[in-house]
Image (tube, rainbow, N blue to C red):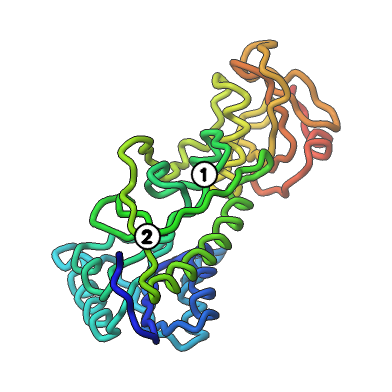
């Protein structure tokens, strides 16, 4: 059991993208004191590649919360001055707990040990399945029927800490990475508030992760975006949903000299009709492509520099000769 804490709870926050921003907003709405946020350094974004603050930084600044943006937290790493400055900020913040959600940096032991009650992580999977960087996408790609959120007491391992709260969420057949992300972000925001309230009441129970069922959600690689039509149509349809919106899945079509982005597709059957890559049919229903097993129907596509188009519109400007 975690030792009870008296209000007001001082909650530090470490996160970067929109998934994290929703959790920080929930913590603020719940009335917890947030004396410090950690987030990734500003990154180039948009056509002009203008340096842009993270979603978490933007929210923190609107609430006048101090922000630290070290490139590393390792005191013996490449950026020791930045890590030392972050350490100074964390010590001064006198945190009861640090909430971590999609932060993007590994926390060394000195960070994990600094808050009075350690660090709680919002992880978008049912641990120990899909530890690692891309649990949302890998769950869809694997054809999982459900995922969920685990609130975890962090330790030095990669998503290996004790589980505090676990709640499943069904994966619908139409879910892509964007829609599932939004559902899990809302779920995670709700669960972290429940965990923080339970922390105050000495009601959090730590459960070690089971040794069986461990899988790792490897970071997405752009090289995976190119659809290999020698694989099954069902698997490729899942990958398209998993890679929507980023990094996106692409396919090579006859008569087009560059990869075409595929936003949506379905497997229409599991039989083999022709050689992989053959265009079986073009109609208002979609573009049917033969795979090693089954037929993949492309429903929404985008040429380089063009707009997203339903297949019925796309084929009007496509000559496959």
Viewer-proximal residue among 318 and 176: 176
Q: Position of residue 112 (x, y in %)?
A: 25, 66
Residue 262 sits above or below residue 308 on the image: above
Q: Is any atom of residue 52 visible in this view?
A: no
Q: Quadrant of the C terminus?
A: top right
Viewer-proximal residue among 56 and 8: 8
Viewer-proximal residue among 122 and 45: 122
Residue 103 in the figure: left or right of residue 138: left
Q: Position of residue 57 (x, y in %)?
A: 46, 76
User: Which residue is found at the position 54% from the left and 26% from the top?
Assistant: 228
Callout 2–callout 1 Cβ contact below 8 Å: no
Quickly name the residue at label 1.
137
Q: Position of residue 149 (x, y in %)?
A: 49, 54
Q: Is any atom of residue 87 visible in this view?
A: yes
User: Which residue is found at the position 32% from the left and 54% from the top?
Assistant: 162
Question: Which SS class for mark 2?
Answer: loop
Quickly name the residue at label 2.
104
Viewer-proximal residue among 18 and 166: 166
Residue 21 sits above or below residue 35 on the image: above
Say whether disc 2 or disc 1 marks the residue closer to the N-terminus.
Answer: 2
Question: Dividing the picture into quarters, in which one does residue 287 lie?
Answer: top right
Spatial CA distance of label 2 from label 1 is: 16 Å
Tell me the crowding category of disc 2: few under 14, some 14 to 19, or many 20 or more residues within 10 angstroms, Cα based. some
Residue 286 in the figure: left or right of residue 254: right
Residue 257 in the figure: left or right of residue 281: left
């Amino acid at each position: 059991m975690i030792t009870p804490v008296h209000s007001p709870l001082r909650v530090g926050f470490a996160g970067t993208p929109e998934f994290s921003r929703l959790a920080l907003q929930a913590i603020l709405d719940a009335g917890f004191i947030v004396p410090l946020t950690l987030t990734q350094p500003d990154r180039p974004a948009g056509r002009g590649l203008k340096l842009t603050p993270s979603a978490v930084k933007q929210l923190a600044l609107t609430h006048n919360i101090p922000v630290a943006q070290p490139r590393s937290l390792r005191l013996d790493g490449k950026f020791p001055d930045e890590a030392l400055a972050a350490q100074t900020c964390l010590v001064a913040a006198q945190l009861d707990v640090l909430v971590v959600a999609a932060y993007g940096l590994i926390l060394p032991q000195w960070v994990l040990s600094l808050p009075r009650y350690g660090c709680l992580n919002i992880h978008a999977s049912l641990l120990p399945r899909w530890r690692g960087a891309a649990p949302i996408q890998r769950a869809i790609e694997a054809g999982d029927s459900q995922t969920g959120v685990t609130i975890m007491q962090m330790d030095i391992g990669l998503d290996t800490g004790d589980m505090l709260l676990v709640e499943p969420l069904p994966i619908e057949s139409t879910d892509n990475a964007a829609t599932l992300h939004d559902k899990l972000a809302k779920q995670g925001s709700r669960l972290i508030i429940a965990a923080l309230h339970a922390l105050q009441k000495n009601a959090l129970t730590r459960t070690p992760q089971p040794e069986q069922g461990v899988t790792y959600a490897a970071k997405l690689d752009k090289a995976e975006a190119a659809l290999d039509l020698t694989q099954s149509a069902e698997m490729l349809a899942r990958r398209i949903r998993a890679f929507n919106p980023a990094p996106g899945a692409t396919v090579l079509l006859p008569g087009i000299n560059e990869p075409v982005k595929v936003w949506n597709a379905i497997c229409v059957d599991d039989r083999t009709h022709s050689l992989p890559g053959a265009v079986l049919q073009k109609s208002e229903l979609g573009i049917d492509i033969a795979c090693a097993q089954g037929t993949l129907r492309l429903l929404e596509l985008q040429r380089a520099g063009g707009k997203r188009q339903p297949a019925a519109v796309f084929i009007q400007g496509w000559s496959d000769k």
